[in-house]
Image (cartoon, grey):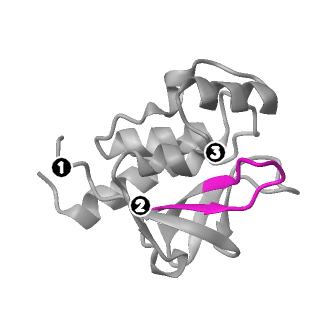
Amino acid sequence: MKPVLEARRDAAQATLDRYRGQPFRFGRYDCCRLAAFHLRQLGYKPALARGGSYSSALGARRALARAGFASLAEALDTLGLERIPPAAAIVGDIVQADGEDAFGALAVVLGNGRIIGWAEGHDGAEVMQMIAMNTAWRVPPCPKS
């Protein structure tokens, strides 16, 4: 088994490689799919996709409800991930900022104050400075894997 920080770094790199430059598209390239992919890289089985497919904000909200969650934060909490202050987030952690809708926006921490995610004014998912995050979760490799 590789060291924890190495596993976290490799998972963050895989997430960056898969999503960087991908235009936002509900149900394919969105923050929920990004976070679920990242969690799978670390051995988790996120229930985020349990609600089925969707192609709009309304469909995403319905899929989240079908999966049994009121919010993306609740879905992450059910994995047993520790909530931490966003300023304490390190490579491989997941952070959330307020979004244009009620969902909020999830992103993966790459380290050195940078995240991968989507933001207004960008054509696709990009590496950005981590600012205005309101929630974060520590994401160590899953102990069950």
Q: Residue 74: horizontal and vertical position, in percent?
A: 52, 48
SS state under label 3: helix
> What crowding class fits label 2: few (fewer than 14 Cα within 10 Å), some (14-19), or many (20 or more)?
many
Q: CA distance from mark 1 to mark 2?
A: 15 Å
- Residue 92 is marked as 2
Q: Circle 3 is placed at which residue position?
A: 31
Please state which of residues 35 and 14 is positioned toward the viewer in this rendering.
Answer: 35
Q: Could you say which quadrant of the image residue 31 lies in?
A: top right
Image check: 42 left or right of 94? left
Q: Could you say which quadrant of the image residue 72 lies in?
A: top right
Residue depicted at x 56% and y 77%: 113
Please give the range of residues in magenta: 93-106
Residue depicted at x 55% and y 37%: 69
Please state which of residues 112 and 94 is positioned toward the viewer in this rendering.
Answer: 94
When the figure is inspected, residue 128 is found, relative to residue 52, above or below; the finding is: below
Label 3 amino acid? Cys
Residue depicted at x 17% and y 42%: 144
Q: Residue 76: horizontal and vertical position, in percent?
A: 46, 48
